[in-house]
Image (cartoon, rainbow, N blue to C red):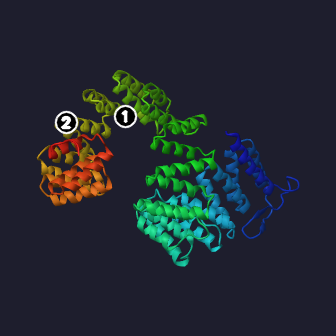
Amino acid sequence: MNKSYALLLALALLQGCQSLAPKTDVQTPAPVAAKSAEKPVVYGSFKQDTLYSLLVAELAGQRNRFDIALANYVDQAEKTQDPAVSERAYRIAEYLGADEPALDTALIWARNDPQNLDAQRAAAIQLARAGRYDDSMTYMEKVLQGQGDTHFDFLALSAAETDQHTRDGLMQSFDRLLVKYPENSQLVFGKALLLNQDDKPQQALDLLEAHPPQNGEIAPVLLRARLLQALNRGPEALPLLRGAIRDNPEDKRLRLTYARTLVEQDRIDDAKAEFESLLQQYPEDDEIRYSLALVCLETKHWDEAEGYLQELVERDANVDAAHLNLGRIREERSQPAAALREYALVGPGPDYLPAQLRQADILIANGRSAEASKLLAEAREAQPDYAIQLYLIEAESLGNNGKETQAVQVLEQAIKRYPDDLNLLYTRAMLAEKRNDLAQMEKDLRAIIAREPENAMALNALGYTLADRTTRYGEAKALIEKAHQLTPDDPAVLDSLGWIAYRTGNLEEAERQLRLAFERFPDHEVAAHLGEVLWANGKRREARQVWAKGFEAQADSPILRKTLLRLTGSESL
């Protein structure tokens, strides 16, 4: 066990000894005092067997037998109903992450010390962790009535992963308390969090703006900034954050949020200056160092980025991400061998697959397909949990480098090994479409739909291809409309809706849907489609403007070049 962990818990147990152990002989228990929110409360003497059990718990804790310590404390909390014993049991259970004992002992403590706001708060928090939100609100209201420090934000945040029915019940509890305490900022903030969880950012923002933060509270400001970003009103978040920073110049969270908002608003140089200032103030914060490295990568300040990333490696912080990005720098400098060395240092985790993909791409692009295949086969053996993704990486790399036949062979090998994996089938379908093997593409996509009738991605892919590559418009329209029912805001589906409308002669509907798609996702393929519809509608200047935006998204877009050549006689604007 970690020594510091053991030491901290031992100190907690020793503090328990001081409050629970008698001042005289072990055989003569003395009264035990425990602090409440009001004043010290003196409890009656313990029986000899109770005192013995508690002392065994203390000794067990000192010897790192925390299981015995916790078991004895919980047992005596239940038997004695003593607030001091139950508080000590609760503290140990919470420290050990023992959820059930923490809940049981918190409730005993709260029940036997009703004026103690710490006890009521502990019960509220543990009930929330157990998903008993109505009961939790009852205890938290007691803290509110006692003018203690409430944690309604914790209750709201803990409900994020629950079902809608549970969140609706919690929302009703918040509304009930807001009628009684309409200006309570914690209640307002908690309800705003719930509204945001329910995808109601505008309502959450309206609530926060109607109840400005009191006493320099920071969390509501941070949430307002996030909501403004979600509502595509990011520029408004910047003056909001600047004002809060002016009032709280040392608040790290505000300054980090401000720097990240600058990035989101594409003010990269300003963000870089802000992160540099933050790192100067907090030189030990490696998350700031990593953020600054990423900003330097974005602005192509390769030397600076390399310096920060090397520092992360030396400090043993974000090491995998550092090696991944160092590999990227080596590629930018046309140093493939050095890039491969960096990528090979990335271990299992979120950066592992991107590193494997880059290694495969470098090797295959340099005519070393056999090495790439061997590398990925060894990776599948070493990391079986990543096997399917590694097959997909190999197929993608081969396909991207013009080796579609080898890519199909890899996928067929993978499908034999993992016949139930739909991602493999979908990838083979997309590769078949690329090879003009529409029969295989349709076979694979229909196999996916047969297993998952509500797989919107497969429905849309098949519908779009039928609309684009065949005249089976009725089938295409039905598939796309079903995908739209399942994912009404998906830009890819909106693009397909627009394209089938165009192919069937409904230019007005085509333009409407494609404008929606391009607004949500200004991708080069959507730009090609929208531009073509605008061209057909006689809006040729706007069509060229849309195509120009598409080229900004992907300068070498083949679909844009083909569209321009077909409609204008030239591949360029």
Which dot marks residue 364?
none
Q: In what quadrant of the picture does the N terminus appear? A: top right
Going by the numbered disc 2, the residue's amino acid type is Gln
Is residue 478 at least partly visible in the picture? no
Q: CA distance from mark 1 to mark 2?
A: 21 Å
Measuring 30% from the left and 33% from the top, which residue is drawn there? 400
* Left or right of residue 466: residue 551: right
Percent position (x, y) of residue 307?
A: 55, 36
The reply to whether discs 1 and 2 touch (Cβ–Cβ < 8 Å) is no
Establish if 485 lies above or below 437: below
Percent position (x, y) of residue 55?
A: 78, 50
Q: Secondary structure at mark 2?
A: helix
Q: Nearer the viewer, residue 143 or 199?
A: 199
- Check disc 1 and report the residue beneath it: 388
Q: Earlier in the sequence, mark 1 or mark 2?
A: 1
Going by the numbered disc 1, the residue's amino acid type is Ile
* Left or right of residue 48: residue 540: left
> In the current view of this chain or complex, which residue is farthest to the right?
24
Percent position (x, y) of residue 333?
A: 44, 31
Tell me if mark 1 has few (under 14), some (14-19) or many (20+) residues whose alpha carbon lies within 10 angstroms of its own. some
Is residue 194 at least partly visible in the picture? yes
Place residue 462 in its image quadrant. top left
- Check disc 2 and report the residue beneath it: 440
Measuring 63% from the left and 58% from the top, which residue is drawn there? 250
Tell me if mark 2 has few (under 14), some (14-19) or many (20+) residues whose alpha carbon lies within 10 angstroms of its own. some
Measuring 59% from the left and 68% from the top, which residue is drawn there? 140
Place residue 378 in its image quadrant. top left
Q: Secondary structure at mark 1?
A: helix
Percent position (x, y) of residue 194?
A: 47, 64
